[in-house]
Image (cartoon, rainbow, N blue to C red):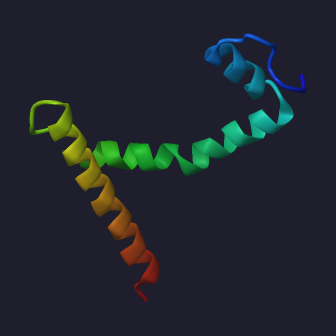
């Protein structure tokens, strides 16, 4: 299947159409190696939020993601 999704397709239908194209299939396959490991690692670090409410949870998530990214940078630059 190639080309754009059908006119008036819902977002879910448009994504389903895109994933059936060769380019979409390759992009989705690459996602497994780029996005999924980061989410899995964050789940190991942060298995539960200590604060209550969306703002508190977002703050904790941002802090954990920042710490994780800083550690990656440190490991990449340390000799």
Closer to the camera, 24 or 40? 24
Residue 31 in the image, given as x and y percentages of width and height: 61, 43
Image quarter (top left, top right, bottom left or bottom right) of the C terminus? bottom left
Q: Is residue 51 above or below residue 20?
A: below
Whether residue 9 sits left or right of residue 35 in the image: it is: right
Residue 63 in the image, given as x and y percentages of width and height: 24, 54
Work out which residue is located at the far front of the displayed protein and give it: 8
> Which corner quadrant of the image does residue 43 belong to?
top left
Residue 48 visible: no
Q: Residue at x 40, y 68 (%)?
A: 72
Q: Is residue 32 above or below residue 22?
A: below
Q: Is residue 32 above or below residue 53?
A: below
Work out which residue is located at the far left of the displayed protein and give it: 51
Q: Residue at x 24, y 41 (%)?
A: 58
Whether residue 2 sits left or right of residue 17 in the image: it is: right
Residue 23 visible: yes
Whether residue 63 sits left or right of residue 26 in the image: it is: left
Whether residue 27 sits left or right of residue 55 in the image: it is: right
Tally of marks: 0
Closer to the camera, 67 or 41? 67
Image quarter (top left, top right, bottom left or bottom right) of the N terminus? top right
> Which corner quadrant of the image does residue 24 belong to?
top right
Q: Residue at x 68, y 37 (%)?
A: 28
Work out which residue is located at the far right of the displayed protein and give it: 2
> Which corner quadrant of the image does residue 14 belong to?
top right
Residue 52 in the image, given as x and y percentages of width and height: 10, 31
Q: Residue at x 20, y 46 (%)?
A: 59
């Amino acid at each position: 299947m190639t080309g754009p999704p059908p006119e008036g397709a819902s977002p879910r239908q448009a994504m389903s159409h895109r994933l059936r194209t060769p380019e979409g299939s390759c992009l989705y396959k690459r996602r497994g190696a780029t996005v999924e490991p980061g989410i899995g690692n964050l789940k190991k670090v942060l298995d539960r939020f200590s604060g209550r409410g969306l703002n508190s949870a977002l703050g904790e998530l941002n802090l954990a993601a920042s710490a994780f990214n800083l550690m990656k940078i440190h490991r990449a630059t340390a000799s």
